[in-house]
Image (cartoon, grey):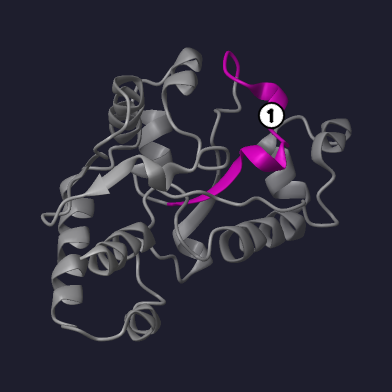
Amino acid sequence: MRKINKGNPIPGFNGNNFNNSCNNWSDFHRDHKDIFEESRLVILTDEQNQLCGYTEIYINELIDCHIDHYKKKDSPFFPELVFDWNNLIVATCDDNFGARYKDNTSGINANDYSHIFNPVIDDVENYFYYYDWGEIAPKSGISDLEKERVNKTITVFHLNHNSLKNRRKALIRMITTFGQMAKKEIRTALENSSFRSVIDQILESREAT
């Protein structure tokens, strides 16, 4: 997970004004499909650099992703945020981790949001560490409370699912085969890769040695 720098809504996205014509998100998806699809594209490409907002999986096809409400939109959660642009994050369509795991499996409740990281607000890269075997853990040097938030975030989004760990491990091994290739060349070679935070961590650690 990494910081998402949200921009302004697209011109056709009227935010809470949709409440005047849409009873729910499904109505918006159906009756304003062109605006929905453009919103998804802009969030993914302009704000998230084609990375899933939770897992950092690289998304090449729009069919593989959906717009997630970071804070769940249904009552008793946060229905007032259903058309809040800053609550919209594009995520992969996978039940085992990420957005769907958060919403359908994790058992999250409204109070839990104060105990996990929000990639729209928090500089998440400052708190997560990636081991060579692909596992995510709290970074050293952070407070006990911050470590609890890291672990809770990992649990809610299932970020240490074996599939994610194995993919991160494979990426780390690939980077080691680059030897002493220049940092810029490595970034160019991996510009369409998943797990940008893993790449950043490895390159930063090389600079420090």
Up-down relation of residue 26 to residue 168 (above or below): above
Q: Spot the residue most to the front.
A: 209
What residue is at 79 percent from the left and 57 percent from the top? 10
State which quadrant residue 71 falls in.
top right
In the shown orientation, is residue 108 left or right of residue 48?
left
- SS assignment at label 1: helix
Q: Is residue 97 magenta?
A: no
What residue is at 59 percent from the left and 66 percent from the top? 45
Residue pointed to by mark 1: 81
Q: Position of residue 18 (x, y in %)?
A: 83, 38
Circle 1: is it few (<14), some (14-19), or many (20+) Cα within 10 Å? some
Q: Position of residue 60 (x, y in %)?
A: 45, 71
In the shown orientation, is residue 39 left or right of residue 105?
right
Up-down relation of residue 117 to residue 92 (above or below): above
Image quadrant containing the C terminus: bottom left
Q: Nearer the viewer, residue 3 or 50?
A: 3
State which quadrant residue 85 falls in.
top right
Q: Position of residue 180 (x, y in %)?
A: 19, 84
Q: Nearer the viewer, residue 35 or 88?
A: 88
Up-down relation of residue 108 to residue 30 (above or below): above
In the shown orientation, is residue 184 left or right of residue 147?
right
What residue is at 80 percent from the left and 40 percent from the top? 15
Q: Which residues are magenta?
A: 75-92
In the shown orientation, is residue 104 left or right of residue 42?
left
State which quadrant residue 12 falls in.
bottom right
Q: Nearer the viewer, residue 148 or 49?
A: 148
Q: Is residue 91 magenta?
A: yes
User: What amino acid is labelled 1 in the image?
Assistant: Leu
Q: Position of residue 151 (x, y in %)?
A: 28, 29
